[in-house]
Image (cartoon, rainbow, N blue to C red):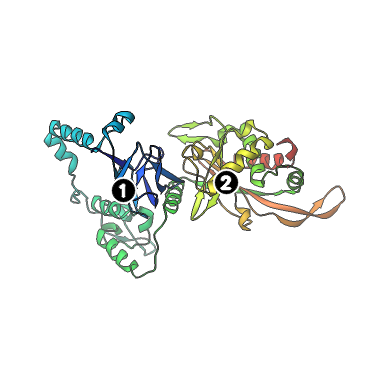
Amino acid sequence: MPTVPILMPQLGESIAEATIIRLGVAVGDAVRTDQEIIEVETNKAVMGVTTLCDGIVSELRAQEGVSYSVGTLLGLLDVTDEEIARTGVESLEAIEAKRAASSQSANPAQAEANLHFALDDDAYEEAPAVVPSVKGLPVPTGVLGAHYISPRMRARMDDLGIREADISAIVGTGAGGRVTVEDLERFLDYLDAWPSSQASPMRLAVADAMRRSWTRPLATVGLPILLDRVLDHRRVQSPKPGLTLYLLRAFALALTETPTTAGYLIGDKVVHPRSFDIGVAVQVEDGVVVPVVRKVDQKSLGELVSEYDDLVDRARRRRLTEQDCSGGIATVTNFGTFGLTIGTPIPLPNETLILGIGAGVKKPVWSSQVEAFLPATEADLLLTFDHRVVDGGGAGVLLNRVSALLQKPENL
């Protein structure tokens, strides 16, 4: 009887692997076409692996809690010839026959070259000796110094899944202060005695995004805003928009007036927004996901409520798709929900701006109309931006415009 492979599917354009969190079938179970048999977690959502045809589960190689790359064989289905003819799926036997034919026709020398590469450290030229500086501190005089990572060291880091930022605490003993493989191994042995836990795919995804974001010169500006008019407007709405949605709408309208502030620098060009699609940061277990609300500038506050609520709900249940999280030009985050009044949010690597708001606090505010201090709800509005694209003045203009729009919530 032919067998059909159960493979880890491509769950999104930028997703290379997923972690098995639940096996929904066992060996011997009968399954139907498009039946969800395995639940997996990516760095953005929880998704299902489905079957391509009817069959009987003959083998399961996947294990819960283990991550597998796209294309990995997770199990096998026994199917009939009639089922293969009906669905057009390829059997494992047909796939292996194709591979055998391909390997026989390939150039052996080329195949060997593709399988081997040198990790030769001899090409590295020793950096000049460390000499004292004017103030008596030893500094490397060469251009490589402690920042140079040899091919051998980089290969070992790749094996361990370690990034450059992870070894910043290691004091290098190599030439010019560089960190050697031996330094790394001693550091890891030292850490073995410390308590630790496995980072989740979500935590690793957030860490990777923040590393890439921080390669740019980021700056933050802020100003206090009064929320009373927004809160009064919200009380009489049905359904009630969240404060973040008011911020989202005001941000989009302000960006339409100065769209270059949301541009993205690529080489010597600033790529302008094609559509004002803005993400909203949603806290989930062990991380943050950013679903994107489409064409925020073209929809009224009332029109956005149901779309926004649905995205946030699916984000918290980890049921977002790759499309739900892609294509944003900026992000809004409400860290005030955690009781925080000040923060410096970091934009995603593919975005130039992130707008954040802190918790509202009752304060006495001077009223020129009655010439007295009156109680008002005030919050800090903060904008972090890529300083290569936007200067402080431009960021300030944008932030003041958002503040002005929030004072007339009936126009949002």
Q: In this figure, what is the number of numbered marks?
A: 2
> Could you say which disc has been placed on residue 28 in the image?
1
Picture quarter with the N terminus: top left
Q: Could you tell me if residue 354 is visible in this image? A: no
Residue at horizontal 69 percent and vertical 37 percent from the top: 302
Question: Where is residue 85, by image quadrant?
Answer: top left
Residue at horizontal 70 percent and vertical 36 percent from the top: 412
Q: Percent position (x, y) of residue 398?
A: 63, 39
Q: Is residue 77 above or below residue 372?
A: above
Camera-nearest residue between 250 and 97? 97
Residue at horizontal 65 percent and vertical 35 percent from the top: 253
Provide the residue designation for mark 2: 313
Report the side of 114 relative to 394 (left or right): left
Report the side of 47 relative to 53 (left or right): right
Name the element at disc 1: loop
Q: Percent position (x, y) of residue 159?
A: 28, 53
- Amino acid marked by disc 1: Gly
Report the side of 7 relative to 123 (left or right): right
> Could you say which disc has been placed on residue 314 in the image?
none
Q: Percent position (x, y) of residue 199?
A: 41, 57
Residue at horizontal 49 percent and vertical 32 percent from the top: 270
Camera-nearest residue between 158 and 130? 158
Camera-nearest residue between 131 and 249? 249
